[in-house]
Amino acid sequence: LAKLQFTVYDMNEAKSKFMKQATEVGIGSSTVLQSASDLTTLAEASPDFVVTSLPTCEASEAVVGSIVNNLPSSSSATGCLFIDTSTISPAVSKKLHQQVKSVSHLHDYIDAPVSGGVTGATDASLTFMTGCSSEETFQKIQPLLKRMGKAVLPCGTSGSGSAVKLCNNAALAAQMIGICEAMSLGESLGVDPSVLANVMNVSTAKCWSSEVNNPHPIAAKSIGSGASVNDYEGGFGTALMLKDLNLALDAAVEEGKSMPLTGLSRQLYSLADNRGLGRKDFGVMLQFLNGK
């Protein structure tokens, strides 16, 4: 991977923003960077890898389906690896894997959702949770993903990466709500939010929501990270967390599992979303609980 050719496609302004930033930092000096006008054009370029990051199951199905069905016949002789970093249901991941393999046995689909948020994407410290059909495929995708993250973790066969991500985010939602409640109570009792966060972060309450993305602006400023210092802009959106909780609970129903705490988390994030906080980082739950 000494030199790569990237083709970028997005339906909104993100593509032009990425191209501008890539030019400014000089990414083009070690790569060939271009943009595609549509998915068919991207597919006709016969890519070796297709990396997608999309907001819904429906979007993943539409994009992956469009590309795999428009790959030139020559691509079937070499194979194309689809790496889907979207957070979608395990069932849809398995369906897409079957669809891609049905076009050519040399093609493959890997579910590889990420953890690490905007900060992780910016400084290339993301964690990829991968569901791979084979060890050979896992070895092929590692060099590419390690350019974007610090950890590429094998989670099992197709669909397992998506399953792990939903479990992670179900736990994360409840974790964040717990930290929000604790920070709110501590401040009401007269404790400096920075002091409370510092104590928690060397005690048993230490976690990502207290140490990396503390929902209290004063604590986050003291720590030196967290979307709350920017009025909850630029983090992991409340609406996206709500989507993941819906997916996790749908999977729980399919498996006959009870998840009462995740259900309560969904109710709270649904209320926050209805309050107009959907685009704010999910740590904005602190402000919602405080009635702001």
Image: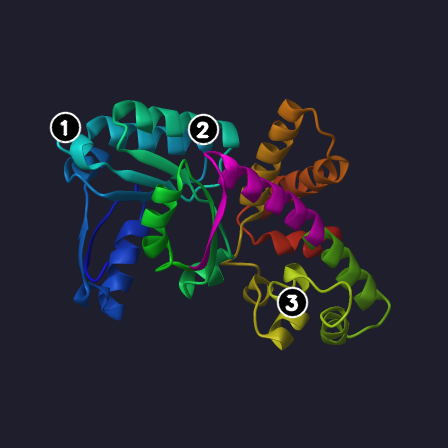
Q: Which secondary structure is most common in the magenta stretch?
A: helix
Label of residue 94 in the image: 2
User: Which of the 4 image quadrants contains residue 25?
Assistant: bottom left
In-front residue for pair 132/31 = 132
* Sequence-first tag of 1 and 2: 1
Q: Is residue 123 left or right of residue 208?
A: left
* Sequence-first tag of 3 and 1: 1
Packing grade of label 1 (10 A; few <14, some 14-19, many >=20) is few
Q: Which residue is mark 1?
A: 73
Q: Is residue 206 left or right of residue 165?
A: right
Q: State the residue at coordinates (58%, 65%).
A: 226
- Residue 23 place in picture, x, y as percent: 22, 65
User: Which of the 4 image quadrants contains residue 197?
Assistant: bottom right
Quadrant of image for the C terminus: bottom right
Q: Separation of disc 2 and disc 3 at Cα?
A: 35 Å
Q: Amino acid at mark 3?
A: Glu
Q: Which residue is mark 3?
A: 211
Proximity of marks 1 and 2: CB atoms separated by less than 8 Å: no
Quadrant of image for the N terminus: bottom left
Please indicate, yes or no, whether residue 117 appears anywhere in the rendered image: yes
In-front residue for pair 69/210 = 69
Seen as rendered, the residue at the extreme front is: 135
Q: Separation of disc 3 and disc 1 at Cα?
A: 50 Å
Query: In the structure shown, which secondary structural element does the residue marked by tag 1 occupy?
Result: loop
Look at the image and name its color scheme: rainbow
